[in-house]
Amino acid sequence: MTDPGTFDSAEKLQSLRRSIDNIDAALVHLLAERFKFTQDVGWLKATSGLPASDPAREAVQIARLRALAEESRLDPAFAEKFLNFIVAEVIHHHEEIAGTGSIDTHRT
């Protein structure tokens, strides 16, 4: 016979995992939307002769994201690492656009 407490725990675990799965799906969709906009920025930079990277903006964004993370009780160092990862990919895309006129959308 199954312990009723075990069943409740298993049910709660499934519910929590469904919520996490929904958030993961939302994150993927949000990242896809973000990269659509950053691709447009890359085209604009390439056609305007601007550099792929903008260190001043990146510094402002990191500070802003760290503050948002603190307000949300998320580790600011983690938030910064996450943003740095995204920014590195965006810069790579901008460099590809500037160099070839296109990007490999299957990479992102």
Image (cartoon, rainbow, N blue to C red):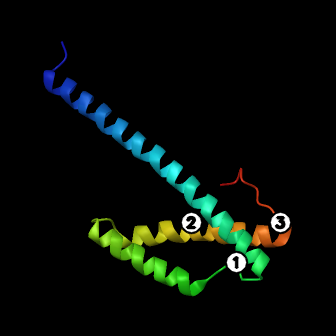
Q: Which label sits on residue 86?
A: 2
* Callout 1 amino acid: Ala
Residues under labels 1 and 3: Cα distance?
Answer: 13 Å
Please name the amino acid that badge 3 sits on.
Answer: Gly
As drawn, 4 above or below 40: above
First in residue order: circle 1 vs circle 3: 1
Q: Residue at x 62, y 70 (%)?
A: 88
In this rendering, which labeled residue sits more in front, label 3 or label 2? 3
Circle 1 crowding by C-alpha within 10 Å: few under 14, some 14–19, many from 20 = many
In screen coordinates, is 6 left or right of 50? Answer: left
x and y, in percent, of residue 65 in the image? 41, 73
Q: Secondary structure at mark 1?
A: loop
Q: Residue at x 19, y 17 (%)?
A: 2
Looking at this view, name the residue that lies furthest to the bottom: 56
Q: Residue furthest top?
A: 1
In-front residue for pair 24/12: 24
Instruction: Name the image quarter holding the N terminus.
Output: top left
Which one is earlier in the sequence, the residue at label 1 or at label 2? 1
Q: Which residue is mark 1?
A: 52
Q: Which residue is mark 3?
A: 101
* Residue for point 19% across, 27% down: 8
Most extreme residue toward the left, as rendered? 4
Mark-to-mark CA distance, 3 and 2: 21 Å
- Whether tag 1 and tag 3 are in contact, CB under 8 A, the answer is no
Q: Can you name the residue that lies furthest to the right here?
A: 100
